[in-house]
Amino acid sequence: MERELDVRGKPCPQPVLETKRALAELDEGVLTVRLDNDMSAKNVAQAAAAGGHEVVTETEGSELLVRIRKQAGAETEVPEVAPTALTGGVPTTTAVAIFSDGMGRGNPELGKILVKSYLFALSEAAQVPDFLLLANHGVFLALEGAETLESLRTLEDRGTQIRVCGTCLDYLGVKDKLAVGQVSNMYDIAEALAHAGKVVSL
């Protein structure tokens, strides 16, 4: 069975969510997702691959086609990329969300010094967070030349999953400068926040 899903022009995270629903309705066969945005295509392909499906991305003129082959008996949905860690039914993951390149609303330069110090302290803590979520101007903390890179790399080496908003990178024109972390989407970020037992937001 073959089916086509047209999500051209739809903002994040709609392409991923609609792909998830379409795969759930498909017993087996190929789902072709038609997109007009490179970042959305990457998000859809990554989410489908995480569900164990075969994925091929092609270019057709100015559009992108993500072809997803689902085998009979495969998962009916694209799994949540940020699964809940459970102990007795209680979420135990920790997520830190940073949506600015500074801390607080006072002096901007002081804010940048504070967020740099915070990330260093976080990287040296006895227990690091499971997820570090960067969106809006928070993505600047993970770019080439950022003074926070060493701390972020230490966090990643110690097991923290760093998710960086792809829509933000694209909008700000800096997606080619990402130096650490994984390009993500708002669906993944929302899932990580929803399933965390503890959330720290800056």
Image: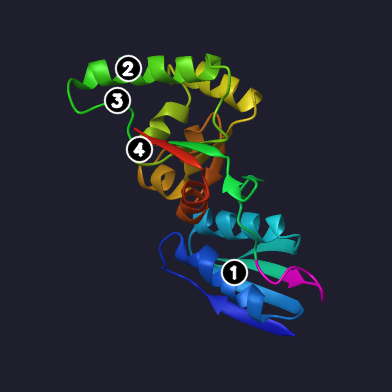
Which stretch did the figure color magenta?
69-77
Read off the residue under disc 3. Answer: 103
Q: Residue at x 61, y 68 (%)?
A: 65
Magenta segment includes 72: yes
**C-alpha distance separating marks 3 and 4:** 9 Å
**Label 3 with label 2: CB-CB less than 8 Å:** yes
Q: Residue at 48% x, 32% y: name it.
A: 177
Whether residue 82 is visible to the viewer of this picture, yes or no, is no
Q: Could you say whether the residue bearing mark 4 is in a helix, strand or loop?
A: loop
Q: In the rendered image, which residue does mark 2 sit on?
A: 114
Q: Residue tagged by mark 4?
A: 99
**SS at circle 1:** helix
| Gap in angstroms between the C-alphas marked 3 and 2 | 6 Å
Percent across and percent down for residue 55 are 72, 62
Identify the mark nearer the N-term, 1 or 4.
1
The answer to whether mark 1 and mark 3 are in CB contact below 8 A is no
Q: Amino acid at mark 4?
A: Phe
Number of the label disc, if any, that sits on residue 20: 1
| 94 lies above or below 82 | above
Which structural element holds mark 2? helix
